[in-house]
């Protein structure tokens, strides 16, 4: 697990593309986030990264909530 600051958070254009590149470069398999646009979700999914939206709270709390959620077999 690694918390990563979104490099495109203040960008006017191309923020999603840059964010996807950063996340993929970390070899992530899951992204826990508050929100994510549909184009970014598709790009992340295409890169093999599962996106979980609607997360809020501290990183510790969000990760624990994810760990506590039953996963499909």
Image (cartoon, rainbow, N blue to C red):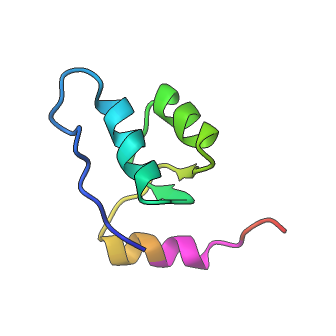
In this picture, is 17 found above or below 47? above
On the image, the x and y values in percent for residue 32 come to 46, 58
Q: Nearer the viewer, residue 12 or 54?
A: 12
Quadrant where the C terminus lies?
A: bottom right
Q: Nearer the viewer, residue 41 or 47?
A: 47
In this picture, is 28 found above or below 45? below
* Magenta residues, start to end: 64-70
Q: Residue 13 lies in what quarter of the image? A: top left
Instruction: State the residue at coordinates (38%, 76%).
Output: 61
- Say if the magenta span includes residue 16: no
Q: Residue furthest left?
A: 10
Instruction: State the residue at coordinates (54%, 59%).
Output: 30
Question: In this orientation, does residue 33 appear?
Answer: no
In this picture, is 11 found above or below 25? above
On the image, the x and y values in percent for residue 14 come to 30, 24
- On screen, residue 61 versus residue 27, left or right, reads left
On the image, the x and y values in percent for residue 8 come to 23, 38
- On screen, residue 5 versus residue 73, left or right, reads left
- On screen, residue 36 versus residue 3, left or right, reads right
Quadrant where the N terminus lies?
A: bottom left
Q: Residue 71 lies in what quarter of the image? A: bottom right
Question: In this orientation, does residue 17 appear?
Answer: yes
Instruction: State the residue at coordinates (79%, 65%).
Output: 72
State the predominant SS element of the stretch in magenta: helix
């Amino acid at each position: 697990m690694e918390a990563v600051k979104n490099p495109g958070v203040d960008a006017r254009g191309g923020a999603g593309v840059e964010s996807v590149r950063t996340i993929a470069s970390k070899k992530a398999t899951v992204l826990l986030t508050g929100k994510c646009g549909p184009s970014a979700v598709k790009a992340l999914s295409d890169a093999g990264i599962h996106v979980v939206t609607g997360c809020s709270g501290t990183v510790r709390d969000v990760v624990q909530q994810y760990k506590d959620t039953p996963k499909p077999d």
